[in-house]
Image (cartoon, rainbow, N blue to C red):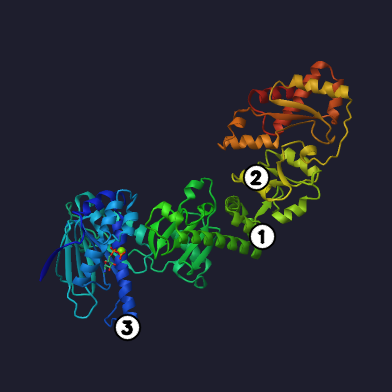
Amino acid sequence: MQEKGTISIHTENIFPIIKKFLYSDNEIFLRELVSNAVDAVQKVKRLSSMGQYSGEIGEGRVEVAFDAEKKTITISDNGLGMTADEIKKYINQIAFSGATEFLEKFKDAKDANELIGKFGLGFYSAFMVADTVEINTLSYQEGAAPARWICDGSTEFEISEGDRTERGTDIILHINAESQEFLDKWKLQEILDKYCKFLPIPVKYGTKTESEEDGVDDEGKPKRKEFEVDNIINNTTPIWTKPPSELNDEDYLNFYRELYPMSEDPLFWIHLNVDFPFNLTGVLYFPKVKQDMDLQRNKIKLFSRQVFITDEVKDVVPEFLMLLHGVLDSPDIPLNVSRSFLQADSNVKKINTYVTRKVADKLSELYKNDRKGYEAKWTDIGMFVKYGMISEEKFYDKAKDFALLSNTKKEYFTLNEYREKVQGMQTDKDGTVVYIYATDPAKQDSFIQSAGKKDYDVLVMDSPIDSHFISQLERKLDKTSLKRVDADVADKLIDKDEKISLVLSDEDKDKVKGIFEKAITNSHMKIEVEALSPGEFPVTVTMDEFMRRMKDMAKLGGGMSFYGAMPDSYKVAINGNHKLMDKILKADEGLQAQLAKQAFDLAMLSQGMLTGAELTEFVSRSIELI
Ligand code: ADP
Ligand code: MG
């Protein structure tokens, strides 16, 4: 009994097209064939449990083997098998029911996934790597005859009686000349590890020839078994498939270590599990954020029924959570379609919203249940929370209750707590509460100390995201502005309309100004004699908050090139109430200049701004003075 036929497709030959256009992604043939095998095993199990099949089920099994001499890769399963009629129906016809459409679309297709999924070409992806494909199968149905199908990559196929005696299917690929790289145990191992590591049915992988061979090699040494045939490559019940109640911390940590060997342990994790209105399971981990954030992106792996699909989860999780690690598994994400389609997909949108909400809930729970522990992790968590608050309105609304601000004393406050704390001392004459922050507490120490003398609190805002977070807080919080601690002298940071009077006469004030102007030759230093507390430093160098922000933005390429092009300009605040002024006024001209220069250099020095020749000159002058 032999039958020949033509695969129902109305165009000459589709296989060269598949090969040519899908070449870059051709390794996915293995994913497709192994997942078909897994499907077949699951189907026969289901039939059995529904009482529609009474034969022995045995242990479900999928095997992948290759034979380097015969140049074949074989994918076998003990699933439900196919009858000759089913082959005709499922392999010959179904796959190309959309053939005309396919041929129209392939021109625009960007990757293999797109085509394979959309047109049900899973099985035919075999022709990306094989000249000839054989199916050798025996259906579970009572009295079914074994069937063999063979196709050489043209539209012609041949069906004959097969020789399989056990239920199940072998798919034998005769690897083509361009794809010989796949006849390599490491290459196949790598692909299986990538796509099949968590499949629900055990997948054995090995080679039939090498492991069975005895004797000696060319050099007379005994030939070694390269690797075992029954090497199971997958974990069939990865943790995301289990109920959280069955898992402990160690399970989650072990799974993390399995996914990301060599990584530091994560801070905490979220187990996702929904089945309505979409299906989604997964575990998302919060990693310790590293300096090189780009290396940490795209670490979430997306699965569909335990088959790995991609680690590009853009759109499925919001941008601000792209640094998370872990897995998501959903049969409801259209995994095989292009980017633009994914963005518009309603399930993808719902999943994105769900993930955002779950993350917010988890953070809120951590904050409520263990505030101390939460504070200890804040440096890492803060990255995500701040990014989320900046980029997602909905997340801001939730996070405003558990976002923390920390000050130079390493105390932590929620937004509300902080306002309570500072509004007494830090409200200006117009009723605006001024939050003061340091971006580099070590460098800005003298300013922090001066602010402390006025009973002002100083926040630490030293992460790369903080400049954006500051703007967001100003937008969101009522009557609030933020000022860097060195934006002005402490007495003027918050304008409370409290006048300190100047002990210098107008005449002396002008004299002092003149002396400093002569001593400080740098034209970007604007000299002002101000009435400050006598305990303040005689000279302080500051940069206006607005000007500094604009310049910072220009540095980041934020389109503020006008400010970027401007030279740095500073205010040199001379404390007219400091007793040094008296000394300067009484000194002779030479000493006047020296004292003014010295006081200015000390201010520069305390801010880490004194460098190079100026620093050397300062040191020489200091030696002279002592
Ligand atoms: P899909 O898996 O999306 O249905 P495929 O092209 O991968 O599309 O497979 C087409 C059909 O061929 C399957 O639906 C199934 O009926 C049949 N099939 C493929 N591989 C096997 C197998 N190993 N055992 C039994 N049936 C199979
Ligand atoms: Mg398939």
Q: Quadrant of ligand 2?
A: bottom left
In the displayed structure image, the side of residue 426 where residue 237 appears, left or right: left
Q: Secondary structure at mark 1?
A: helix
Q: Which residue is mark 3?
A: 51
- Amino acid type shown at disc 1: Lys
Give x and y (percent) for residue 610. 67, 29
Give x and y (percent) for residue 460. 67, 46
Q: Marks 3 and 2, how far apart in space?
A: 65 Å
Q: Residues within 10 Å of mark 2 (few under 14, many from 20)?
A: some
Q: Secondary structure at mark 2?
A: helix
- Note whether residue 183 is visible: no
* Mark 1 vs 3: CB contact within 8 A: no
- Amino acid type shown at disc 2: Ser
Q: Which residue is mark 1?
A: 372
In the displayed structure image, the side of residue 117 where residue 360 appears, left or right: right
Q: Looking at the rendering, in which quadrant would you find the C terminus?
A: top right
Does mark 2 have its CB less than 8 Å from ligand 1? no
Q: 290 or 325: nearer the eye?
A: 325
Identify the residue shown where x is 88% and y is 33%.
501
Q: Secondary structure at mark 3?
A: loop
Residue 46, quarter of the rendered image: bottom left
Which of the two marks, 1 or 2, is nearer to us in this view? Answer: 2
Give x and y (percent) for residue 240. 46, 66
Q: Marks 1 and 3, how far apart in space?
A: 56 Å
Is 270 drawn above or below residue 139 in the view shown? above
Q: Any mark on residue 471, and which?
A: 2
Q: Residues within 10 Å of mark 1 (few under 14, many from 20)?
A: few
Does mark 3 have its CB less than 8 Å from ligand 1? no
Residue 584, quarter of the rendered image: top right
Q: How many marks?
A: 3
Which is nearer the N-term, disc 1 or disc 2?
1
